Amino acid sequence: MNVKPLKGILAEIVEYKMHEVADRKKERSLEHLQQDIEDMPPARDFQSALRRGGGSLKLLAEIKAASPSAGAIRSDFDPAEIASLYENSGASAVSVLTDRKYFSGADEHIKAARSVVSLPVLRKDFTIDEYQLYESRAIGADAVLLMAQVLTEEAYADLYRQARQLGLHVLAEGHSEDQIRFIVSIGAEIVGINNRDFDTMTTDLQTTLQYGFLVPPDRILVSQSGMFTREDVIPLDEAGVDAIQVGTSLMQNDDMKSQIDRLLGKIP
């Protein structure tokens, strides 16, 4: 078994994902996917895009149409148009939700977004099987999300290794101290600290501030979830976080460019 015992909405999502992956394997075999990616160009450099260095905090801007907690988020949903706006507004990378049932996502959203930008694109989904890694590469993703909240440590380490061997970058996500320590221990270059507790569905930005010290300075630290105002971002910026991953507060905003400017401190 690749996944941990789960509860609540996360358990429901992952159980459905298991059935979905099984169905996809019947539609297109792993061997066919392996053939599909044989001649693909290298993935765009997600890691370098999010590395802050001596500059400003970076933005991983997310494209999603809906979520279990917020429901439908945006009616005028055009992934390509949104991706272009993100790039032109100063985002450093783009995250695209592809889960269909719970987030109204689709593989086509990644293809549409990536076709119009030069930024690296993360496939944000619930990755529980190596099949999804080949699938991610085949649809054009440059990086994938692996969640330590979901996967057993053995399965996580295996999928991380396989993803890197395929040339995919990995946003290695955790929420608790033990999860962050584990992610760091396997050598993950890009460490995401999710401020959302999936057991309670509450969000606390202190999570990143509390566990950020566990991430060595030569790695990339990404704070995920819960950033709506510049005041939310300032403590993360001052703590040296490399990048923030923001979705809902952008997708719900009628003026996404101004919201990006506010989050990044370009305008009051």
Image: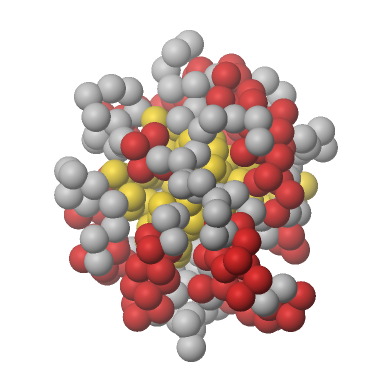
Q: In the image as oriented, which residue stretches furthest toward the right?
A: 75
Answer above or below: position of 78 versus 68: above
Left or right: 209, with 163 as reference point: left
Answer above or below: position of 202 versus 118: below
The total number of labels drawn is: 0
Q: Percent from the top left, x then y, of residue 27? A: 76, 75
Left or right: 180, with 69 as reference point: left
Judging depth in this view, the residue of 223 and 114 nearest the camera is 114
Q: Percent from the top left, x then y, of residue 46? A: 42, 42
Q: Percent from the top left, x then y, of residue 203? A: 47, 51
Instruction: Indicate the colouring scheme.
Output: secondary structure
Answer above or below: position of 214 versus 10: above
Q: In the image as oriented, which residue stretches furthest toward the bottom?
A: 1
User: Residue 218 sits in which quadrant?
Assistant: top left
Q: Percent from the top left, x then y, of residue 119? A: 51, 33
Judging depth in this view, the residue of 227 and 94 nearest the camera is 94
Residue 126 showing in the rendered view = no
Left or right: 240, with 88 as reference point: left
Left or right: 154, with 118 as reference point: left
Residue 142 showing in the rendered view = yes
Q: Residue at x 49, y 56 (%)?
A: 144
Q: Residue at x 44, y 55 (%)?
A: 168
Q: In the image as oriented, which residue stretches furthest toward the front?
A: 39
Q: Which residue is drawn at 53% across and 75% down?
A: 129
Answer above or below: position of 70 versus 259: below
Q: Residue at x 50, y 68 (%)?
A: 199
